[in-house]
Amino acid sequence: MSTATVPRSADHEHRSALSNDFAGTLYQLRLFARRDRIVLPLWTAALGLLLPITYVGSIESVYPTAADRIAFATTTAASPAQIAMYGPIFNASPGAVTIWKAGALYTIIALAVILTVIRHTRGEEESGRAELVESASVGRYSGLTAALLLAIGAAGLTGVMSAAALIGGGLPVGGSVGFGAALAGSGIVFAGVAAIAAQVSTGARVARGVALSVLAASFAIRAVGDAGSGVASWFSPQGWSLLLRPYAGERWWVLLLHLTTTVVLVGVAFVLLRQRDRGAGLIAERPGPPAATAALAGTLGLAWRMHRGTVVAWTVGLGLYGLLIGSAAKGIGGQIGDSQAIVDIIERAGGPKSLEESFIGFGLTFLGIAGSAFAISAAIRMHGEEAAQRLESVLAGAVGRTRWAASHVLFALLGPAIAMLVAGLAVGLTYGSATGDIGGTLPGVLAGALVQLPAIWLCAGMTVALFGLLPRFTSVAWGVLVTFVLIFIVGSIANFPQPVRDLEPYSHLPKLPGGEFVAAPIVWLLLLTAALLTAGLIALRRRDLT
């Protein structure tokens, strides 16, 4: 006797195959969340709670009256350079004035999401962990899906937290929810951008470069649009977040641009993932020449080949930002108006009494923070070479560990110095042209840019020390930099205890231009950097390679 069987339909087989492709997504999500248990909560809390609360408190103390806010908004609206940096200010309400500079968070959250997605997608493939995990019962789409769920969930949580923080600060509910939604929207769009970038190249470094280039282009389009007619801003995700207009008649339909773009980008990323092989990229690696050139004969030449693109990109980026700072500095006193509170804050922070010079000094400090990120990224490249097992092949020849590491350390120190020099020239020439006194302003501005180098080099030394002593925790250097930045931004406004404020290096540097030059903190920072570099290099010679 035979038993009749019912054939499976094509639709049933398609659903089964699709479910297999996503098998293990929750497992990978838990794994990624555990590996990101320190960094992700840190940037989520900073962007969602700490910075919005700080903005509310600072605006209330600096511009306590409606007249102060009107003067601020009027002067700001008349400054194309300020609008290019932060976006338009739509009215003089407490909410609109509060979140004007908070518009920079739209870029910061995009950066955090990009790094999160690529770390858990292309970074996992590059290290070989993805292949190991997928040897189990894990679907092809599970890794990308888990990374997107983690990043998009963190962006959404950041938006909810920021809205709650602003509402708690006494601002209107509608505008607060609008700002939180705009913040989350910027994050989720660039999660899709990072997902596509992760399919492009076999290396996480190139994938990050592609995604960050899109972010930089988006910022540039938004800046040009806001400083001009505003039309170009509609072609930028960061422009969409500003054009939602929190606290100025919210345009809720703008969120559809974020959501639609995210869906399209994520869909394209999954299609591209389906078409490529595991470990490969859509852009095939070009075969190199049969023999290395003379420039690659030593460790220094190899390091230059690895760092040259980064040096150029950071130098151009800091130089462009320097042009914005120099352009915005002229007339900053009119924006501040007669507010004694902000003068008190500047003097408490140790800045000079000239508001324009103080603005340039603070701008140069933020350029120094960016230079610190450059130094860390260059120094941490050594950890990437070791983790990818390329270091072992290099050291198999007549190359010592110290000589190999010193070549990378050189670019971690020299690269930011070049970038800061170019940025200082950009600030000085632009501001000097506006005041009609290039010769009188350029030397002081250049000094203010170069005086940031001890703090920048300290971050490089810290990274090298972690790499030598605790290679597994080398990436903690990024967390330390974030801590430095938070203390610097919030410390003087929130009146942190002085011992806490002393933990970050930037406030110890001479406040140039305009302030008094003091050599002692520079000497101490340089000595500490030398000690960290020495400890890291000695530890690298003595430890086993991972």
Image: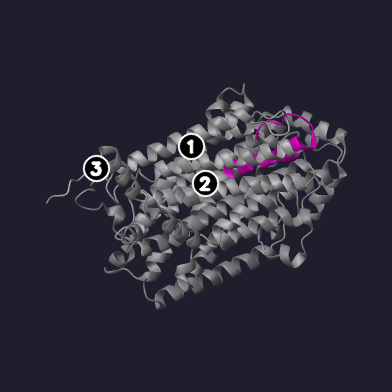
Closer to the N terminus: mark 2 or mark 3? 3
Q: Are marks 2 and 1 in contact (CB under 8 Å)?
A: yes
Q: Are marks 3 and 1 in contact (CB under 8 Å)?
A: no
Q: CA distance from mark 3 to mark 1?
A: 35 Å
Q: Is residue 333 left or right of residue 319?
A: right
Residue type indicated by callout 2: Ile
Residue type indicated by callout 1: Thr
Mark 1 — residue? Answer: 262
Helix, strand or loop at label 3? It is loop
* Quadrant where the C terminus is found in the figure: bottom left
Q: Which residues are magenta?
A: 87-108
Q: Is residue 100 magenta?
A: yes
For residue 39, say whether it is visible: yes
Residue 152: which disc? 2
Q: CA distance from mark 2 to mark 1?
A: 10 Å
Q: Is residue 512 magenta?
A: no
**Residue 31 quadrant:** bottom left
